[in-house]
């Protein structure tokens, strides 16, 4: 089947193609009733405007992609942004970045700002409590939207995620292979966060595969470095403490490293999820399940560019694999 055109939409509504163009580009006065009929025809026919061609017509001020990340200070998302920018710059597009501070309200406000600037596409790391049904009309109108690190809630859209579950399972299996039977888990907040759920499930999968029981007392929370440090100390203070720890994000890893160093504990094995700067010079060097943030950014950019080029296939979820980097901290015997 051929793709529906602006002319098809105009014929369905009984207006000119120029009127359809005004509605879709918000360019000029159109009666509210006519606007609603045009958008209804767009949804009915599945019309998607060629946004790349539109950018070529209206000029570089619209040739931008909006990126929403949770926090500027997290090096993981900085590397993701770099991967996106490298890919889209070659196509003459500019990347605009904003931070949601992990709040749904600020995320939605940023997206509204980007839409007001008429960006060509959106790439969003969704906040932990966000609901993205408010973007349905934008999806229907043809705006490419890709979600990073976590899938959207209430919206069917492209997403790019790491192999969180399989990566965590590999990290725990590695510790089990060195003889550990009580392994602490330090995760993110909230407990419903997609990445925490997936990594915790990988932890449980590895325990089940090894025939080991799941002990809820060994599961702690440490979103930032200080909280992770305190969580590590709580685990070590248990009557039957763990002999190994799995830190399920980069801040949890940093907190665990600090806690073990200050306590003088060189007998507790540690595997972190996410690599850290200078991980190789720690004592012992940190074993990690490493994500590939640059590749995540590049895959997201490729999805956006394919949509801008007219790809109308169903929403896809791309999975970027992790890899275990063995350095020493995860190879201590109990």
Image (cartoon, rainbow, N blue to C red):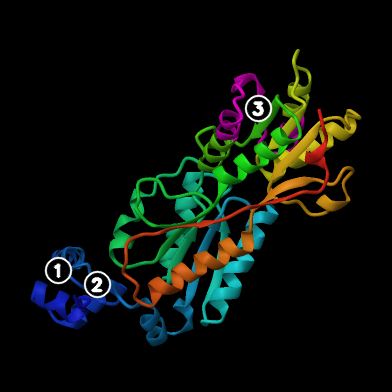
The disc, 1 or 2, on the residue closer to the chain's N-terminal end is 2
Which residue is drawn at the image coordinates 38% and 49% (left, top)?
132
Q: Position of residue 182 (x, y in %)?
A: 70, 24
Q: Is residue 235 left or right of residue 266?
A: left
Q: CA distance from mark 1 to mark 2?
A: 9 Å
Q: In which quarter of the view is residue 248 placed?
A: top right
Q: Which residues are magenta?
A: 203-229
Asked whether disc 1 touches disc 2, contact meaning CB atoms under 8 Å apart, the reply is yes
Helix or strand or loop: what does disc 3 sit on? Answer: strand
Q: Nearer the viewer, mark 3 or mark 1?
A: 3
Residue under label 3, please give it: 220
Residue 96 among those drawn in magenta: no
Q: CA distance from mark 3 to mark 1?
A: 56 Å
Helix or strand or loop: what does disc 1 sit on? Answer: helix
What quarter of the picture does the N terminus occupy?
bottom left
Residue under label 1, please give it: 34
- Residue 80, compared with residue 224, is above or below; it is below
Q: Residues within 10 Å of mark 1 (few under 14, many from 20)?
A: some
- Residue 311, compared with residue 152, is above or below; it is below
Q: CA distance from mark 3 to mark 2?
A: 52 Å
Residue under label 2, please give it: 23
């Amino acid at each position: 089947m051929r793709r529906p055109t602006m002319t098809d939409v105009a014929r369905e509504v009984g207006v000119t193609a120029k009127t359809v163009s005004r509605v879709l580009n918000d360019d000029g006065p159109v009666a509210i009733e006519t606007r609603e009929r045009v958008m209804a025809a767009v949804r009915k026919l599945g019309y998607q405007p060629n946004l790349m061609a539109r950018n070529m017509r209206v000029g570089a001020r619209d040739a931008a992609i909006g990126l929403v990340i949770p926090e500027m200070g997290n090096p993981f998302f900085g590397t993701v942004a770099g991967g996106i920018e490298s890919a889209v710059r070659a196509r003459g597009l500019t990347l605009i970045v904003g931070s949601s501070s992990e709040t749904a309200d600020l995320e939605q406000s940023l997206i509204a700002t980007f839409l007001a600037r008429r960006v060509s596409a959106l790439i969003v790391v969704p906040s932990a409590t966000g609901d993205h049904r408010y973007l349905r009309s934008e999806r229907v109108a043809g705006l490419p939207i890709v979600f990073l690190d976590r899938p959207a809630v209430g919206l069917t859209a492209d997403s790019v995620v790491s192999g969180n579950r399989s990566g965590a399972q590999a990290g725990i299996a590695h510790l089990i292979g060195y003889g550990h039977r009580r392994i602490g888990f330090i995760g993110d907040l909230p407990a419903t966060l997609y990445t925490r759920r997936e990594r915790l499930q990988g932890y449980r999968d590895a325990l089940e595969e090894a025939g080991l029981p799941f002990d809820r007392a060994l599961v702690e929370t440490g979103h930032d470095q200080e909280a992770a440090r305190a969580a590590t100390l709580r685990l070590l203070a248990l009557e039957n403490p763990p002999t190994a720890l799995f830190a399920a994000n980069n801040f949890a890893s940093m907190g665990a490293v600090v806690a073990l160093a200050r306590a003088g504990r060189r007998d507790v094995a540690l595997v972190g999820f996410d690599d850290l700067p200078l991980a190789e010079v720690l004592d012992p060097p940190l074993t990690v399940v490493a994500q590939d943030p640059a590749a995540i950014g590049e895959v997201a950019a490729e999805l956006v560019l394919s949509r801008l080029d007219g790809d109308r296939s169903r929403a896809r979820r791309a999975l970027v694999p992790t890899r275990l980097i063995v350095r020493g901290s995860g190879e201590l015997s109990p």
